[in-house]
Structures are given as structure tokens and as C-alpha cells.
Image: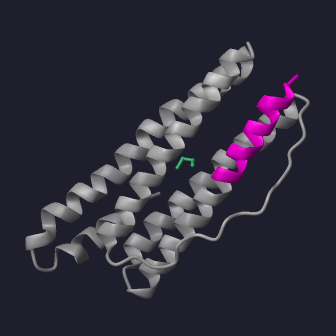
């Protein structure tokens, strides 16, 4: 059974995961608007991953006899000055999410809620991958800055994300 505090914090994290999906769909729409369909595809796949994160938390709250409470999802930013700026924001967001997961684990340990602690370990590993994925694209954008046409090659590569 979840404590009131952990139930509340898990619901907050649930909202953040839905916001993450919303943010990445907004980035996808930005890439669509500048005709970079590979970048758009990458962000759409990312948004779907975020929905799967939300689903995991949604199910866990119920499994632990808690109540899922959906709050309003904040409006995400809608434009970026460049593909690099969008990916830098995505990395910043992932670092923020990593911090939230760490805080949640701290609370779970304070409440002696081992089940929540163990559940959240999956997210700890996932966040390493999420930060690495954004970092990889940022590095590539920076590397190809001097190469004309490089952005289109990267667009092709990002289109292949499953
Ligand atoms: Fe991007 O990992 Fe969930 O929010």
C-alpha cells in the first residue's frame, strides 16, 4: 500500500511523463514545420516512449492500491531557434527528470517503501539511456556544423529510429 506522500509524488511524476510526451510531440511539430522529417520521427518515437513511462507509473499506482489522479498538462514550448537548441532543451529536460526520479527514490527510502524504490530503479537505468541519446544527437549536430548538407544526412539517420 502506498503512503499518501508517495502516492502524491508518483502522481506528480505521472504528470511529468505525460508532459515529456507533450514536449517531444511539440518538438516533433517544430521539426515538421522546418521539413526535417527524420528529426520529427525521432521525436515522435521519443514521445511514445514517454507515454510508456507514464503507463508504467499509472499501473504501479493502481497495483499498490493507490489512486491515479490526472492533473492538467502544462503547455510546452512550441518553437526553437535551431535543431541544436531543441536537442539541448531535450537534454536539459531529461536531466531534470533524472533529478525528479532521484528525489522520488529518496522519499521512498524515507518512507521505507522498498517496492517503490525497486520499481524506480528501472527509471534510473532508463534515464542514463535518455540522457545519452540526446547527448549523442547534440554531439553529431555540433560535429557536422561545418559540413554543408550534414543536417540532411543526420535527418536520414534519425528517421531510422524504431
Ligand atoms: Fe524522458 O524519460 Fe520519461 O520523462
Taking the view exactly as shown, the residue that stands out farthest to the left is 146
Total marks drawn? 0
Q: Is residue 151 left or right of residue 117?
A: left
Nearer to us in this view, 32 or 157: 32
Q: Is residue 156 visible?
A: no
**Quadrant in the rendering for residue 72:** bottom right
Q: Magenta part mainly helix, strand or loop?
A: helix
Nearer to us in this view, 94 or 162: 94
Q: Is residue 9 left or right of residue 77?
A: right
- The residue depicted at 39 percent of the width and 53 percent of the height is 91
Vertical arrangement, residue 126 with respect to residue 26, above or below? above
Pinpoint residue 124: horizontal percent, then vertical percent.
52, 31
Q: Is residue 18 left or right of residue 46?
A: right
Pinpoint residue 64: horizontal percent, then vertical percent.
85, 27
Q: How is the image coloured?
A: one colour
Q: Is residue 52 visible?
A: yes
Q: Is residue 161 left or right of residue 55?
A: left
- The residue depicted at 69 percent of the width and 16 percent of the height is 110
* Quadrant of the image containing the N terminus: top right
Nearer to us in this view, 120 or 79: 79
**Quadrant in the rendering for residue 70:** bottom right
- The residue depicted at 49 percent of the width and 31 percent of the height is 125
Pinpoint residue 6: horizontal percent, then vertical percent.
77, 30
- The residue depicted at 58 percent of the width and 35 percent of the height is 101
Vertical arrangement, residue 51 with respect to residue 104, above or below? below
Q: Is residue 3 magenta?
A: yes
Q: Is residue 91 magenta?
A: no
Pinpoint residue 159: horizontal percent, then vertical percent.
38, 68
- Magenta residues (range): 1-16
Amino acid at each position: 500500500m502506498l503512503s499518501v506522500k508517495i502516492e502524491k509524488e508518483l502522481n506528480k511524476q505521472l504528470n511529468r511523463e505525460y508532459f515529456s510526451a507533450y514536449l517531444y510531440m511539440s518538438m516533433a511539430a517544430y521539426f515538421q514545420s522546418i521539413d526535417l522529417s527524420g528529426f520529427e520521427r525521432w521525436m515522435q518515437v521519443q514521445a511514445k516512449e514517454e507515454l510508456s513511462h507514464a503507463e508504467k507509473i499509472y499501473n504501479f499506482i493502481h497495483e499498490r492500491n493507490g489512486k491515479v489522479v490526472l492533473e492538467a498538462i502544462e503547455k510546452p514550448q512550441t518553437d526553437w531557434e535551431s535543431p541544436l537548441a531543441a536537442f539541448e532543451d531535450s537534454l536539459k529536460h531529461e536531466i531534470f527528470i533524472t533529478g525528479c526520479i532521484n528525489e522520488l527514490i529518496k522519499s521512498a527510502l524515507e518512507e521505507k517503501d522498498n517496492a517503490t524504490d525497486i520499481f524506480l530503479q528501472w527509471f534510473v537505468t532508463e534515464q542514463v539511456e535518455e540522457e545519452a541519446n540526446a547527448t549523442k544527437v547534440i554531439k553529431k549536430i555540433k560535429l557536422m556544423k561545418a559540413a554543408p548538407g550534414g543536417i540532411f544526412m543526420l535527418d536520414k539517420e534519425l528517421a531510422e529510429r524504431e
